Amino acid sequence: MRIACPHCGERSLDEFLYSGDATVRRPDFASPTAMDEFIAYTFERTNPAGPHRELWYHAAGCHAWLVVTRNVATHAISSVEPARDVALAGKPETKDGA
Amino acid sequence: MATADRRGNGRQPNRLETGGLIDRSLTLHFTFDGKTYVGHPGDTLASALLANGVRLTGRSFKYHRPRGILSAGSEEPNALVELRAGARREPNTKATVAELFDGLAAASQNRWPSLAFDLMSVNSLLSPIFVAGFYYKTFMWPAALWEKLYEPLIRRAAGLGRASDDSDPDTYEKATAFADVLVIGAGPTGLAAAQAAARTSARVILVDENAALGGRAIDDVAEIGGNPSHEWVKIVEAELDRNPEVRVLRRTTAFGCYDGSTYGAVERVSDHLARPGPGVPRQRLWRLVAKQVVLATGATERPLVFGNNDRPGVMLAGAVRTYINRFGVVPGRRVVVFTNNDYGATTVTDLTNAGAEVVALVDSRPQPTAEVQRLADTTGVRLISGVVTGALGRQTVSGARIRAHGGDTVELTCDLIAVSGGWNPNIQLTTHLGGRPVWDDRLCAFLPGALPPRMSVAGAAAGDLILDKSLAGGIAAGSAAATESGHKAVAVPVPASTAESDAITPLWRVAEPDGKAFVDQQNDVTAKDIELAEREGFRAVEHLKRYTTLGMATDQGRTANVNALAIMAEITGRSIPETGCTVARPPYTPVALGALAGHHRAKSFKPTRLPPSYRWAKEQGAVFVETGLWLRPSYFPRPGERDWLETVSREVTTVRNAVGICDVSTLGKVDIQGPDAATFLDRIYMNGLKTLAVGKARYGGMLREDGILMDDGTVARFGESHYFITTTTANAVKVVQHMEYCAQWLWPELDVQIVSATEQWAQYAVAGPKSRALLQKVVDPTFDISDAGFPYLGIGEITVGGIKARLFRLSFSGERAYEIGVPARYGDALIRRLMEAGAEFGVCAYGTEALGVMRIEKGHISGPELNGTTTPRDVGLGGMVSTKKDFVGHVLGKRPGLVDPDRPALIGFRPVDRSARLRSGAHFIARNATPTAENDEGYMTSVAYSPSNGHWIGLGLLKRGPERIGEIVRAVDPVRGADTLVEVVSPVFVDPEGGRVRG
């Protein structure tokens, strides 16, 4: 498999580490239901047989975390985005959550 | 090497005077089972054996039947040999692909005591018990006999060759190459495809498993573009070799198709040589990445299934043509050709031209085609419409029993039966990503179904067996692939070629065969075994395969699978598509593990990292220990010391009473900068860091999101927006990855930069009451390192002899201690300077052992406690955990199971009998309880002999440990047979008030 790192170009799979589901976002620790939300965020996963958004780390490259959209049934990759961009797009502009 | 006196006279009875692509001007000597023979460059071991009249090459796997050479390629099921000797000895090498070299030594396999007289062939008489499924039926009871009796017996009786016991003396390498168009297979189709693609100036890679390009264009006699086909091959090959955009990989098998249009291929760089040249690998593993791929892998001929069809002398018709045309060897003098198709029948012409006598052409079709009739008319060969029911001859073929349609039986004397049951397109690579083959009734073969992305198939692999169609298909596929990859099309005309016919009527097995009719020759599976499997209910393809072991040998049933499937279809009255098909997984042919490993062997697999003081420590005679990849000094023995314990105790005592120095450079070091660095670190660490002042350091712990401790270390603040942290040696890489994750994915709005500095800084711990006095002599005098100017947990940038350095007042030992860091290139100089300066204070160097003893004496946690199951509270750090801020692990760390007061928690232990030795890993059991899993109350994590206490001490995780000080429990170690009474004590065994670190 090959992954097109947005910074480094198309690279072989063995430069990357897979690191789980990119569809879950870390909940607010101050939420009244924080415990249930964190349990779901940390442990509960769907197992789709099709396109899936995943986090990959370009460990032997630029150290970028990436959101890879991959069809897990065919391994066809439809997009690779810097995780930072994806995260910022889905997040209001706050500096300190505490 | 063959010696001069053993050299033969060079007579090769079956070698033709002319013809073939061998070099008769050079003679190569080789041995088979100790006997010397000769051959020529261009030969394979198989062609050279046949030239010398050697027909018996091995014994079969189960029945020990005599076997010879069936094919001329990588599909060979029978002619497996042990090649070479000593460390290079390799079993199960196909004689049909092993290229001959001078001095080659080969031995037959699976025979005892000799190939011609094999005692184990008695298995043939026992064949009723060796039927399909015999493993499951025969050796059911009693179980104890399996291990002691059956298995050793079977292993001796049934087997293949012996691997060398020595380690492989050769090297292997890996390479990656990129292409616009990858063409797999260099027969007429592949050559045409590569030529067409290359003419568009596309980057082309052409691979072929053989040393010589050409495929059937050199195996058969034909005309292409007005030239003999082997001349056409040379012309195209020259054009490709001239083109700098074309890479031709000969002796290279594309063995697997992977995601992202990536192909695995193995190049046998030096397999055709006695030994690789200097600096040259034995084999090279290629990763080929292609925009477009043309699969031109050709087809493999099917044998026919009749009685004793495994006798040496029964050979695929295409192989017979190959031996004649490519190698100038005629494998038989009196030949019966047995075919169910027109292509097979053409073998008569090749044989006749080579001077062999074709005693009969047996065509299984009720009505021979016009092609075959014409062939019989022109050659005058006796055409029999019927079948060969059995090969005659005990060790090799001496005749054929033929039953004509209508019932007349005739026995003809012959020494070779050339058989053709049709062709199976080599579509393995189309199925590696899950594509299912599709049955074609006209060709009686499976064709590629859904293809992997960016692949096209052409020629015989796509079912175009006829030369004209192959060439047209190759050119079309090559041109299309090149344009798909972005190149402008260039018209390439299809060269004219010899007319051919591929008409076929299936014959899956001969009815009422005379003798055992083999389907899978390598695993000794007969047509009867398939009937038996059917009777016993194993009708599905996958069941048939596993029950009979059909297709599961090293050849993966390339000459067997379709025949077997068709026979099962015939028996069950279903169609072949209804019966199913098996799909292939990589590799297409076996790949040596050495090639897959490449250079990643031994130290190249696991390189050694040397700390900055390594050279100095080596000079001191240090004993080293591997910690991860690092080679760290374990202890520094001095003359007269009896054992490691005496040395380590001396080092500990020196640190506690004077001063010692330890290289701690292996700890992970991370530089963190940015306006939001403080906020960032506050969310990474479980304890509050916002109050950490510039110029100060603090111990910190970080959790995983599930609340389990991940790592610990120190955080030093060099500026408002500049931090420098340390991690444990083991987690140096993981922590950086985790921080990058947090910075980029969890909190991308924070402005922070993270960089690993582990290898940039050499860092030494200088520990002991006299540490400051020592450093005073080393640190440049402009810097105030007095207790007032540089108190406990103070940090600062300093210089040492004008060199930029960093000083941290941190202590792992519990003594007054510092860590001094310099750029790594000054590490060697600094250790020498520190030791020299410390001489007057009685300084010693200490290693990881003393480091460990001192941290256990102080109750500090390390790897054994940070073991992926412990919470901060478990290891006595519960008080550090902030309740106010968000940090990784905050919420889930409060889960009921993690805050259960019954959880084992860190506490100290000492033996009741002070002379007793403690063992880590021992489990704690209440004094009066029986040592069972139910009564388990935790376990000892770390132990050491404490010179400061004069007895062994331990740290461990004990249920409600901190509440049980003074209690006596058992430390039970069933593995080492120890059961020791231990007293629960404070985990701090030295200076519990902690006054010493402050001086």
Image (cartoon, rainbow, N blue to C red):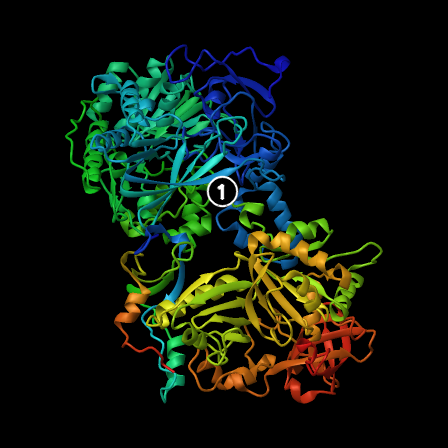
Image quadrant for the C terminus of chain B?
Answer: bottom right
Residue lying furthest front: B782
Q: Is residue B85 above or below residue B14?
A: below
Q: Is residue A59 above or below residue B153?
A: below
* Residue in the picture at 43% in, 15% down: B23
Residue B834 placement, left or right of B463: right
Image quadrant for the N terminus of chain B?
Answer: top right
* Residue in the picture at 76% in, 75% down: B979
Residue B797 placement, left or right of B560: right
Residue type highlighted by circle 1: Gly
Using the rendered image of the protein, determine whether residue B931 is visible from the camera's viewpoint: no
**Number of marks drawn:** 1
Q: Local crowd at mark 1 within 10 Å, few (<14), some, or many (≥20)?
A: some
Residue B833 placement, left or right of B76: right
> Which image quadrant is residue B947 in?
bottom right
Find residue B424 and report its horizontal and vertical position in percent: 31, 38
Find residue A24 and report its horizontal and vertical position in percent: 33, 73
Find residue A34 and report its horizontal and vertical position in percent: 38, 85
Find residue A5 and report its horizontal and vertical position in percent: 32, 55
From the viewer's side, name the closer residue of B934 and B161.
B934
Residue B324 placement, left or right of B276: left
From the viewer's side, name the closer residue of B360 and B953.
B953
From the viewer's side, name the closer residue of B238 and B278.
B278
Q: Is residue A51 above or below residue B937?
A: above
SS at mark 1?
loop
Q: Is residue B781 above or below residue B684?
A: above
Using the rendered image of the protein, determine whether residue B671 is visible from the camera's viewpoint: yes
* Host chain of mark 1: B
- Mark 1 highlights which residue? B598
